[in-house]
Amino acid sequence: MLKQTMRLVLFPAAAAVLVACGGGGGTASVTIPSMSGVAAVGAPMGGASIVLTDKNGNQWTTTANDRGAYAFADLTGAAAPFQVTASVKMGDTVVTHYAMVSESGADRVANVTPLTTAVTALVAPTDVPTTLTAGQISTITAEQIADATAKIKTAIAPLASNLQLGSYDPTTSSFTANRQGIDLLLDHINLTVRPEGITLANKMAVTSESQNSTSATGSTINKNSASAVTPISNASVTQTAGLDELAAKVQDCFTVSSTERLVVSDSQNGTLHSKCADLALPGYLHNG
C-alpha cells in the first residue's frame, strides 16, 4: 500500500518535468535574444565600435564590418530598453551616432544612423545626444521611442515616398549601405540638434536665393511637443551612385605628387598623370 501511495505522489511531479521538457522525447524551443543592424550616414561607418548598453548598465561590444553591418548573436540577460552607440573616425572627424531600442527578442534590427540619432535626441534626458547612463536609459519608455520615431517618419515622409521606400522605419528596416534605397535617403539627410529639439532637412535640395540654407525647407521638431510635425517641404532627390568610385579615383590621383598630376607643355596643352586621367572628360577646358 505504501509503494502504491508513493507511486501516486511521484507521478504528477514526473509528468510536470516531462511537460517542461517538451513531453516524451521532444526538444524544447529556446529563443536567444539577438540584434543586428547597419551603422551608416549615407556612407557605411565601416570599422565602427558598436556598444550596446541596457537599462542596468550591462554592456556588449563588437565592431562593424567594412559595410557598417554589426551583430550581437546572444544578448541573454540584457534588459530593455537599450542604447546602441556607433563611433568611428571618418576622414579627420570622429563620427558618433545613437539608437534607442525599446524591446529585446530574437533577430531584432537596430540601425544606427543620423535618423536614429534624431530619435535619441527627442527622448534622451540630455540637451544633446550622448552616451547615456543606466539611470537615464531606464527612464525612457517604449511609448516615448515610438512617438519620436513616428515624428521622424512624418518629417521625412516626402523624401521616403520619392525614393519609394514604403513602410520605412529608421531603426528596424533592414538595408545595405550601398547608396541605394534607404542608404540614398541617408545621403540626403541633414540633422541639426539643439537642446530644445531637432531640425531635419534635405541637404541635396536646391534652394532659392532668398533661402540661405536647406534648413529653410526643413522640418523642426521640439522635445515634448504635441504639435503636428510639418514634413520636409523640398523632397527633391539626387542620385549619388558613383560617388564612392569618384572619391576612390580622387584619392588615387592625390597619391601622385602635385608636380606630376598635370604636366603643362604650353599655355594651351597639358598631360594628366594616368592616375588622374579619368577625373576629367577629354577636351575639358577650365574656364574655356
Image (cartoon, helix red, strand yellow):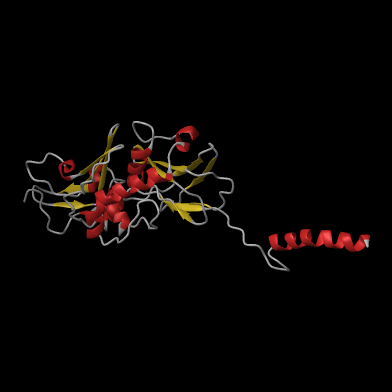
Q: Report which quarter residue 21 is drawn in.
A: bottom right
Q: Is residue 285 found left or right of 76 in the rendered image?
A: left
Report the front residue among 49 and 258: 49
Residue visible at 31% across and 37% down? 224
Q: From this viewpoint, which residue is outermost toward the front?
A: 1
Q: Can residue 249 be spotted in the picture? A: no
Residue visible at 19% across and 44% down? 218
x and y percentages locating residue 10 in the rendered image: 82, 59
Q: Quadrant of the N terminus?
A: bottom right
Residue visible at 33% across and 57% down? 168
Q: From this viewpoint, which residue is outermost toward the right?
A: 1
x and y percentages locating residue 276 in the rendered image: 24, 52
Q: Is residue 242 above or below residue 200?
A: below
Q: Is residue 177 found left or right of 222 in the rendered image?
A: right
x and y percentages locating residue 22 in the rendered image: 68, 64
Q: Is residue 74 found left or right of 15 in the rendered image?
A: left
Q: Report which quarter residue 200 is drawn in.
A: top left
Report the front residue among 265 and 151: 151
- How many numbered marks appear? 0
Q: Can residue 115 be spotted in the picture? A: yes
Report the front residue among 12 and 256: 12
x and y percentages locating residue 186 in the rendered image: 29, 51
Q: Is residue 61 found left or right of 280 in the rendered image?
A: right
Q: Is residue 213 above or below residue 283?
A: above
Report the front residue among 123 and 235: 123
